[in-house]
Amino acid sequence: MKFYTSIFTGTLIIGSFQALYAQETAKHEDTEFYTPVPKVLTPGKLNTDAPSDALVLFDGKNLDQWVMADDRTQPAKWKVEKGIFTVDKKTGNIETKQAFNNYQLHLEWRIPTNITGEGQARGNSGLFLASIGKGDLGYELQILDAYQNDTYTNGMAGSIYKQTTPLVNPAKKPGEWQTYDVLWTAPTFNADSSLKTPAKVTVLFNGVVVQNGFELKGPTQYIGQPAYRQAHGASPIKLQAHGDKSEPVSYRNIWIREL
């Protein structure tokens, strides 16, 4: 009996070392895929007004509902002008003052008309549906130019970044306003911090369903496989100041309803 137990324990140890080695030697390309390519379609006109029970996160006037993500004592420093606000890559990510569990979120975003670059360097930002730490930690719904812009399909607009491709591609041209309407179900955890239920998300992109109750494998991970490594509760919503050189993304008309 002791002999078999020793073999079993040794197998577990070897397996753990192999998993750790695989993670340390992984490359970001390992988790990028280019097929299937979502079908391109033309979105319809949308009704985007906030309902009466919504909390308005941005009404075109100020960023009073937002703070700097890496220093929550600091107010959001992105510039508000003419009813919109624009990513400031020099100051960093911003996130909501308030934390949320399950919710309905509406957000409008715009890729600059004069966008340059290609692939991931073309209007890259991100909507983190739950921010769970400084930097780019959390669960990311990608924001990127997806109009005739080739990149890995689990990194295009409408994707849950590095986890799943959108069902279709209803992206508009750069310079046109686009919408995300999100139904988010936060993950839950047991008393020992192990996962109880995974996060789920449904996303409408320009009024078209691109994620339908997708179960997330964990928070976003740029390199390696995602997993639920950290238990957490209600979390802020974060907008990313991505560190590329392309022209910054703008936002307007953001509201949320807790479910």
Image: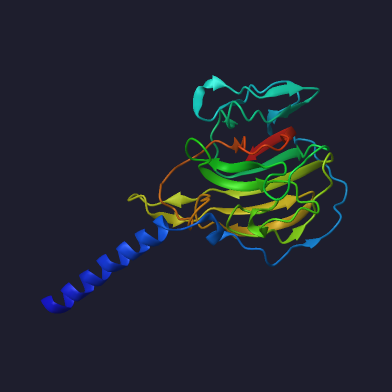
Q: Which corner quadrant holds the N terminus?
A: bottom left
The residue under the point 61% across, 27% down is 90
- Asked whether 155 or 255 is in front, the reply is 155
In-image side of 192 versus 154 (left or right): left
Is residue 96 placed above or below 213 in the rendered structure?
above
Snapshot quadrant of residue 256: top right
Could you say where residue 40 lies in the image, as x and y percent from the top left? 81, 60
Snapshot quadrant of residue 162: bottom right
Snapshot quadrant of residue 63: top right
The residue under the point 51% across, 58% down is 217
Number of on-image labels: 0
Q: Which corner quadrant holds the C terminus?
A: top right
In-image side of 212 versus 72 (left or right): right
Res 259 visible: no
- Asked whether 178 or 54 is in front, the reply is 178
In-image side of 228 versus 3 (left or right): right
Could you say where residue 91 lies in the image, as x and y percent from the top left? 59, 26
Could you say where residue 145 lies in the image, as x and y percent from the top left? 75, 47
Is residue 10 placed above or below 145 in the rendered structure?
below
The residue under the point 66% across, 24% down is 78
Could you say where residue 234 lies in the image, as x and y percent from the top left? 50, 39
The residue under the point 37% across, 63% down is 19
Res 134 visible: yes
